[in-house]
Image (spheres, rainbow, N blue to C red):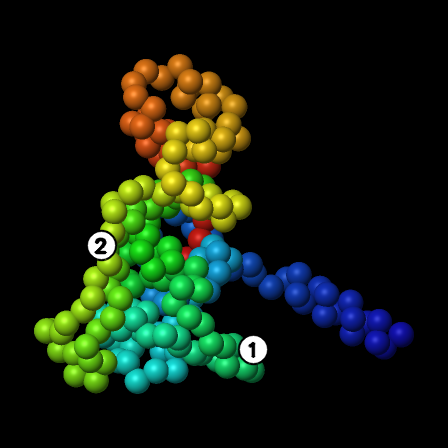
């Protein structure tokens, strides 16, 4: 009898705990600075913080992520064990100003339909000890091409009209408006991505 009382008391206590408040995403929303190991980390705005990563790199440095992600791998504690990750294995990261998917795709639009641009990537640095403001770095040039990340499923693909249309069809009324709209598909798609996101907002813990 006593054990049953304790059990139900625990259930009621858990149910009474306030849920973490979420806010509707707007362009002035600031993501927590750190490494997102998964899409779920991104959705919950819960990255591995720079201070949690085991490294000699200054966590407060504006070049922290450039230095960290140029290494072969890095490590951090999680669930009482040390996790090792290679830069190419991360979902993405937020540097306090911009948010990136993987190593070379920058989020241009965030919503149910995320729009990303392929940007330049620094591959390596000549020094991690005293890089200063001047250092030699190999740079992989970005193409500037646009890509889509489906916030709901995690699917990632080139921004092609047919593939975006498949997502727009989730909103039958909006898709009808899209079909009736005049203009080149390339421009229409970009406009309707923003409209779709407005009608179907995403929320992040504040």
- Looking at the image, residue 35 sits to the left or right of residue 28; the answer is right
Q: Which label is found at residue 79?
A: 1
Q: Please name whichever residue, 166 or 43, is drawn nearer the observer in this view of the structure.
A: 166
Q: Quadrant of the C terminus?
A: bottom left
Q: Quadrant of the N terminus?
A: bottom right
Q: Count of labels shown?
A: 2
Residue 80, image x and y in percent? 56, 82
Pick whichever of labels 2 and 1 is earlier in the sequence.
Answer: 1
Q: Nearer the viewer, mark 2 or mark 1?
A: 2
Q: Please name whichever residue, 20 or 165, is drawn nearer the observer in this view of the structure.
A: 165
Q: CA distance from mark 2 to mark 1?
A: 37 Å
Residue 186, image x and y in percent? 31, 28
Residue 115, above or below 76? above
Callout 2: SS? loop
10 Å crowding of disc 2: few (<14), some (14-19), many (20+): few
> Which quarter of the picture shows residue 69?
bottom left
Q: From this viewpoint, is residue 47 visible?
A: yes
- Looking at the image, residue 62 sits to the left or right of residue 68; the answer is left
Residue 115, above or below 134? above
Residue 40, above or below 74? above
Q: From this viewpoint, is residue 111 visible?
A: no
> Which quarter of the picture shows residue 46?
bottom left
């Amino acid at each position: 009898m006593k054990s049953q009382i304790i059990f139900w008391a625990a259930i009621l206590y858990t149910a009474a705990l306030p849920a973490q408040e979420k806010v509707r995403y707007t362009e002035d929303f600031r993501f927590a600075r750190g490494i997102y190991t998964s899409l779920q980390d991104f959705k919950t705005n819960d990255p591995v913080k720079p201070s949690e990563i085991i490294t000699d790199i200054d966590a407060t440095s504006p070049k922290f992520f450039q230095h960290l992600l140029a290494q072969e791998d890095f490590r951090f504690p999680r669930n009482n064990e040390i996790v090792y990750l290679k830069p190419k294995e991360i979902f993405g990261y937020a540097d306090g100003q911009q948010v990136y998917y993987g190593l070379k795709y920058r989020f241009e639009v965030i919503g149910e339909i995320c729009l990303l641009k392929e940007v330049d990537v620094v591959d390596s640095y000549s020094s991690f000890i005293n890089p200063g403001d001047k250092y030699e770095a190999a740079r992989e040039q970005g193409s500037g091409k646009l890509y889509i990340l489906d916030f709901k499923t995690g699917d990632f693909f080139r921004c092609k009209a047919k593939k975006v249309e498949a997502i727009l069809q989730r909103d039958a009324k909006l898709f009808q408006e899209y079909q009736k709209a005049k203009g080149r598909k390339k421009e229409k798609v970009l406009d309707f991505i923003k409209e779709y996101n407005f009608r179907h907002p995403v929320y992040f813990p504040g």
